Image: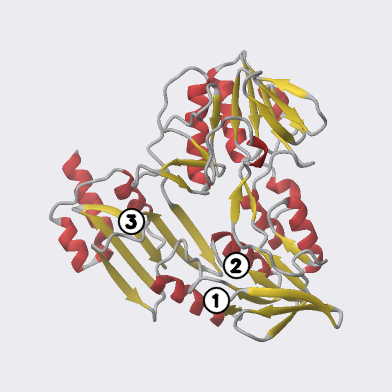
Amino acid sequence: MKHVIIGNGPTGLVAAETLRRLQPDAEIALIGDEKEPPYSRMAIPYFLHGNITDAGTHLRKTHDHYAKQRIHLIEGRVDKVDAAAKQIEFTSGERLPYDKLLIATGSRPVMPPVPGIDLPNVHTCWTIEDARAIAAKAKAGSRVLQLGAGFIGCIIMEALAVRGVKLTVVEMGDRMVPRMMTAKAGGMIKNWVEAKGVAVHVNAAITGIAQKDGALAVTLSTGGELAADLVICAAGVRPNVEFLQGSGIAMERGIRVDNEMRTSVPDIYAAGDVTEAIGFHSGKPELNAIQPNAVDQARVAAHNMAGGHSVSQGSLAINVLDTLGLISTSFGHWQGTGDGVEFVDETNHRYLSLQFEGDVLIGATSIGHTDHVGVLRGLIQTRTPLGAWKQRLLDDPNQFMTAYLASAQKAA
């Protein structure tokens, strides 16, 4: 059996290692298009912090890990999937056959159509190569403007702030982390960040970048011009699917997969950020670029590629963010359906929103909660009926740990 995996990030690597455990004699090829060993993008901020070297971002630390696992690492860019011939084709023209194929090509940064976005000193922060370039330029006191205050943007912002730059963040949404936080919670994070010395512009977009007086002049949709030595674009990501045109694989925004991670083409699977997987609550295809989901999907795909039967529970929002020392989380259908409760303590930087469907918790958002916050995810993921505890939580949402223990005792 020959397994080929396109994409050597956490999704691809977990799938490869799972396949090796399940099929000791199989051939496994893991393909990446960067001149780096498999590494974690989530570790890049720690590299920017200066806490680790670039080697510290590597997913496996021993030099002979892949040789011992008999995972064949291939550097190259795949241009085409020929499903009829069961082969992939590289930009070089070389072809590689497969019995089972996993597409784990992830996402890439969105570059908005802004004049000047391709100027020197305008960067994304997605690859370790990007991070090296930024680290060389983001010196203490330098003026850095960041476009985007989503989840990825806030992680980058944390690393930049540690470097002592003069940081300005521009966000098109009406609050920080708009796809993770409620309006109130996003506003609280903005207030926290501004108190730490970061300038934040919401409801604003960059309309142009030009070179001026030895720096970059950035114009905003709200009017005015900001000077910057470095501009970082963190305006979101989109799945890497363009090379699949003509493959016959069903796609919308991402690759459509079922709950076994199978695509519409036999013997081709997909996992991670590149997929539109079945949503945990909606039951419909959703993009959900979150690493815990990606790794779970990798294991499901690998089991099924190896001839087993594994089913995903569905893609679920799982977000945990540290923003300059303020911890925030959101789980599940955190936007809710109108049946919920909100607790706000701005003085102590604490916030909690719980959302229900019937007596089942379907979503939660928190700020400043670090103890036992994982039980909120547990209640959501297990679809635990709360019974009378729903009303108690509506009266005091901070009793969620007690509600969890009561529910667990009842189930036992």
Instruction: Say which amino acid is labelled 2.
Output: Gly
Q: Is residue 7 visible?
A: no
Residue holding disc 1: 193
The extreme right residue here reads 214
Q: Which mark is residue 81?
A: none
* Foreground residue among 370 and 89: 89
What is the number of callouts on the image? 3
How far is the residue under mark 1 from the one under mark 2? 14 Å
Residue 13 image point, x, y percent:
62, 34
Residue holding disc 3: 363
* Foreground residue among 191 and 372: 191
How far is the residue under mark 1 from the one under mark 3? 25 Å
Using a 10 Å C-alpha cutoff, classify the residue at mark 3 as few (fewer than 14 neighbours), some (14 to 19) or many (20 or more): many
| Quarter of the rendering occupied by the N terminus | top right
Q: Report the residue at 53% width, 49% height from top.
A: 289
Residue holding disc 2: 148
**Tag 1 secondary structure:** helix
Taking 300 as reference, is 21 above or below it? above
Q: Is residue 404 left or right of residue 122?
A: left
Instruction: Say which amino acid is labelled 1.
Output: Val
